[in-house]
Image (cartoon, rainbow, N blue to C red):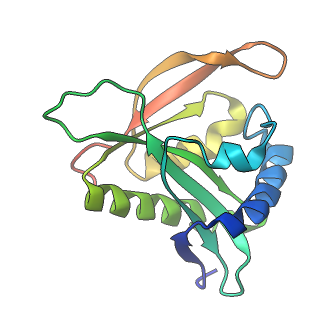
Amino acid sequence: MNTVGIRDRTRPDLPYCVAVLAEVHRLDRYPLNWPANPEDWLSPSNALNAWVAETAQGRILGHVAVHRADLATNPASAPVAEVSRLFVAPAARGHAVGARLLTRVRQWAAEHRFSLNLEIVDHQLSTSAIALYERTGWRHTHTTVAPWTGPAGEPVRLRRYTLPEDQP
């Protein structure tokens, strides 16, 4: 899959992103709670940017977004963006698509002087994603309980990560 490109996501990409997201949800239960309107879920009001990975033929293989984090930050420090909505089509896994999307996010954050963080559901189905984050330099900072519940009303644990400033 050397012909994978990363580009800004456009509105016409959304139905294709939703189709890939549905595949991911069936296999991995991501997102844990299927959104009522997946296109809106991919485009929250606090979104700063989003990208897709695609083949040379234009087939969407993955997606990632960043949005303004709801964190109180020190005015002297860089603003914080949260990485979210990262998913890769099951057929494209094992080809560094997720890592390439994360590299693009890092480039964007450096260009715009944002610090980065993320959260992920602490569940056995998240093992591969957790490994990707840790392999690419993200540091687990703490685990917390989400302010929302899982599909059966159960509490959901979230692992929080930050990207250390010294990471390229």
Q: Is residue 31 left or right of residue 84?
A: right
The number of numbered badges drawn on the structure is 0
Q: Quadrant of residue 156?
A: top right
Q: Is residue 13 left or right of residue 112?
A: right
Q: Determine the residue positioned at 42% across, 58% down.
A: 105
Q: Determine the residue positioned at 17% across, 31% down.
A: 75
The picture places residue 8, in percent across and down from the top left corner, at 53, 68
Q: Determine the residue positioned at 52% across, 27% down.
A: 159
Pick whichever, 133 or 151, lies toward us.
151
Q: Residue furthest left?
A: 76
Can residue 168 be seen?
no
Q: Quadrant of residue 5?
A: bottom right
The picture places residue 142, in percent across and down from the top left corner, at 43, 22
The picture places residue 140, in percent across and down from the top left corner, at 42, 32
Can residue 3 be seen?
yes
| 99 in relation to 161, above or below | below
Q: Determine the residue positioned at 70% across, 32% down.
A: 124
| 73 in relation to 22, above or below | above
Q: Is residue 110 left or right of residue 68?
A: left
The picture places residue 49, in percent across and down from the top left corner, at 48, 56
Task: Tell me the quarter of the image containing the C terminus.
Answer: bottom left
Pick whichever, 43 or 113, lies toward us.
43
Task: Tell me the quarter of the image containing the N terminus.
Answer: bottom right
